[in-house]
Amino acid sequence: MGWGDIDVDGSKGGLSLGWNGNSLISLKSYSPFHIDADVNDCDNGVKWRLTGFYGNPIERLRSMSWDLLRHLHNSNCGHWLVLGDFNEITSSCEKREGRLRSENQMTKFRNALEDCGLINLGFSGRWYTWERGRFQETNICERLDRGLLMQAWSGFNNNAVDKLAKAGQFFRLWSRTRSREQKRQRERIEAHLSYLYEQDPTDKNLEKIMEVQLDLNLEADKEEIFWEQRARVNWLKHGDKNTSFFHRLAISRHKRNQIVGIEDKEGRWVTQADEMLNVAVSYFGKLFTASNSTGVYRLLDLVEKRITTDMNDELLRPFSEEEIWQVVKSTAPIKAPGIDGFLALFFQKYWDIVGSDISQYCLAVLKGEIEMDEINKTHIVLIPKVDRPKKLSQFWPISLCNVIYKIIAKVVVNRMSHILGHCIDEAQGAFIAGRQISDNTLIAYEILHSLKSRKKCKRGNFALKLDMSISESFTPSRGLRQGDPFSPFLFLICAEGLSILLNEAKKKRLMIGAPIGRERFSINHLLFADDCILFGDASENGAYTIRSILEEYENASGQQVNFEKSLIYFGASVDQQVRDQITNILGVRVATNPEKYLGLPMMVGRRKRWAFANFIDRFHKRIDSWNFRFLSMGGKEVFVKAILQAIPICVMQCFKLPKSLCSALENIMNKYWWANGKTGKGIHWCSWKDLCYPKIAGGMGYRDLSFFNKALLTKQAWRLFAQPDCLLAKVLKARYFPFTNFLSARIGSYPSFTWRSICGARELIADGLLWRIGNGRKVNIWNDPWLPGPGNNRLLVQNMSIQWTTVNQLIDESSFTWKDDVIRKLVDLDQARRILSIPLARPDVEDVLVWRYDNTGIYTVKSGYRVLIASRPQLTSNNMEDDGKYKNFYKQLWELQIPSKIKIHLWRLIRNYVPHLCNLKKRRLTLEVVCPLCKAAPEDSDHLLWSCERYVHELKTSCMPVYTPFSTKVVFWRPPPVDIIKLKFDASFDRVSKSAITAVVARNDKGLVMGACAYQYTEVVDAFVAKARACERAVLFAIDMGFRKIILEGDSLTVIKKLRSAKNDRPVIHSIKRIFA
């Protein structure tokens, strides 16, 4: 036993270090803020270093503490553990209540930890380690104490947990033997390759080198795929060989998901494996056992018939093998397997072998000919809902279903998805095609804003956010289980019972709900799966009505409302006495400000950046995770695009983020992108704005968050314009523009933050609208945008005549073609050509407004962002006179089939973003610019690549032939069935001359050419019309040749989707469908 002290200064300061056991402690240094010692752990035979640390409590002197930490790191050698009170937090989530901590303070602390390579050790117990204030209004909690350790030591001390004995000794022995054999095989190949490199580079030896290199690449691929599947990383695609990254991530994931203990129903902490198993079996045995529900018959009597005869016929239509294959193709390939151990990847890769048997089995099950008892068995895995779960109720029980069962379930789900929107109330926003999670968020925010602003009204309202849980009478044995493709849709059908009861109360005027605007429009509930908000009448009767409805729903469904965890928010006009009565009746907590709903804030005040400050913490938390420090530049690119840039998407769909916050997030990503290694900050060779240019324009294709925010909000504006019957559009129309359309609506008085955010994006919609001509009766010739192509879409007046007002006057009624002579008299030659290029279908096709920047005519976030980013000035090159001519070069560069890190290095060379001496001198990092190799010229990119003879010679002599394996993917032509002709169509479009060449080839089931044709079109507006004309020509060619059973095949997915769609919004597509009819 030993002890070390640092004396106190009066009643302040003082540090102590004590130890007990066989460890030998050697004191290295100490100060009033630290004790540093070496530890020789005799029991485990390991040497490591321990530092007790105390951060300076004075804020302005705290930087000195971080400098001390860096100084201690410089003398570090290997395993290092730092414990203590740092008097600082790393993110705002480590503080509760009180004023918001300065971002600059937290950044300095994070930078110090990053420079020292320290990561959080983890903990058990309370999250906050410091507290002040006895009352709720003054209570402040912070996490100031923590344990930190070096990244290299993170896998040293594993959790000491007794593990369940594994069954299947044979497989365990096989796995170990196989692992050793693979390692030895790789070592043998590497040794053989090294031997060959030492031999003379004859043709025979070079051929052997390529063969051995191929074998080595195959072994590396096997190892990477193994660790990739264990790591469960779906966002890293087409990246570099990064087995070490997957290995560390898999180990980290295993440690994070390991259950070391659990509380039983008596509250005892259980750590033994067999005891934990008994607790889990008992808990989930009750949870997954069905029992009889009560009160369901009255609820069923209230259900209205919504399935029509046509819908029912569609549901009962015989299943086909094509439906099964489409499901197999769309299934995630390496998701966790079921009991049988097969991945979907197996079925996708070997469908030509097993497809027939699997299809026949699935069809037999779907027809009811056989049961599926065996394939319906599942493993249940527990996924934690919260950090450091203690109870089984804090886990999600996820069922790992067999792939064959998933195929059967998804085939049925695909049938249901088309008609489910007609059966489920519009207040439900989950899992229904055409409904979005953002709709519920925007509606809830709008209603809560109205409750807050309506201070003088006769009848007050409240919002009740329910905490829904599963009671022991819940019946998953009837089909409801997480992980099952059926479950979301079955749950919606069950949850529809609550909507039915609430709507019945609304019809009887027992629960009218929150009024919207001045019209007789109100909403009394919103649902997203089991997330529920009720909007009730602030009265005693209103509270009792809600209580009785919820009790009836609980008895019928098995779901249970936890009133103690539910929250209620009252409108500004509700008296305190009424509030107390309602609170006592419902037994819920009162919220002064609404909490988050579906992960988004329900009330945003004037301090916008404060409301969204958690995004900065989430960015830092992701980046500071030690796993992602091992990524190459190629891995960093995917990490930034797939992970970091996706974090704020949900919020940016509903709120306009402050520009200062967007800049802060962009600075974090820019710093991470240019960082060199684990602790190096790196040189920022260009700004984030330059990185946001498209790759074809010389950038990296990262997102400008302000522009992307606007593009996402424009998507909401487009939905209000294009889908006026959706619930969100009804709510906003009733509130802000009851007597006009969305594009003409004013912001109004006391608007909500969400409405102002959407209105700020309307200008992009107005700029991109274009009339697609049908019969021309709605479109004004002179005022409306209807000319196709880039540039101005309105007619420039030449010979304006009052008698010509609408476009239909330019169309011949008898032949339904353009009046060529009239058009050429009214407008100039260029505008006449643009008009004549518009395809016409038939008089019954209506004119429609479309988004002109996308071939589908529908606004997409991608197309909107592309328009915004194109409005910025063109990126200028650092070392090229004309950057525009290099667009094809950039395109070819990024299409190269080489590792991403090499492509990025080539991009940096092109953009002059490399640390040669000339660039380093510009940044005052060196004084010399002369090339150290040849001493003949300044060292820059051109000199290193082309002019430095010594450097080029060294590169040539050091290079060895490297074999790059060819892709095994073979593009082949699938023959059609017997007696059916397959027609392949394609088109080539010239933007300058506005002409297109189409071609059609017809083959039979043996691959023999049955006919072919080519046709030229003039006055073609765009590539989509060219492809559609080729498809039309293929159909006409089939009719001329007498082909009755045909299959059309083309490379334009947009044309194929339009042909399959029931909509006729494109005249050229309508013409093709008319031929079929």
Image (tube, rainbow, N blue to C red):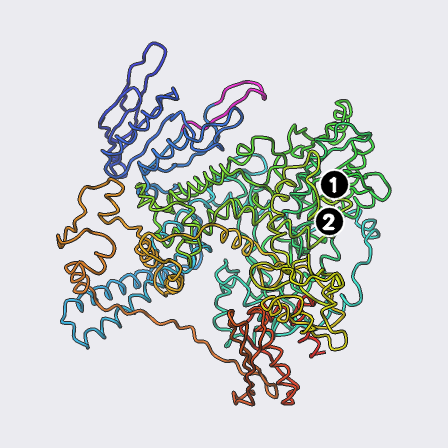
Mark 2 residue crowding within 10 angstroms, few (<14) / some (14–19) / many (20+): some
Along the line of sight, the residue nearer the viewer: 179 or 737: 737
* Mark 1 or 2, closer to the camera: 2
**Whether residue 402 is situated above or below residue 647 in the rendered picture:** below
- Say which amino acid is labelled 2: Asn
In the picture provided, is 303 more to the left or to the right than 314?
Answer: right
**Whether residue 746 is situated above or below residue 1077 in the rendered picture:** above
Mark 2 — residue? 741
Mark 1 — residue? 735
Residue 485 visible from this viewpoint:
yes
Q: Where is residue 860? Give x, y as percent.
A: 58, 56
Q: Where is residue 629? Give x, y as percent.
A: 35, 46
Mark 1 residue crowding within 10 angstroms, few (<14) / some (14–19) / many (20+): many
The quadrant the C terminus occupies is bottom right
**Whether residue 380 is situated above or below residue 138 in the rendered picture:** below
Along the line of sight, the residue nearer the viewer: 1010 or 118: 1010
**Whether residue 640 is situated above or below residue 74 in the rendered picture:** below
Bounds of the magenta span?
A: 131-145
Residue pictured at 75% horizontal, 71% vertical:
843
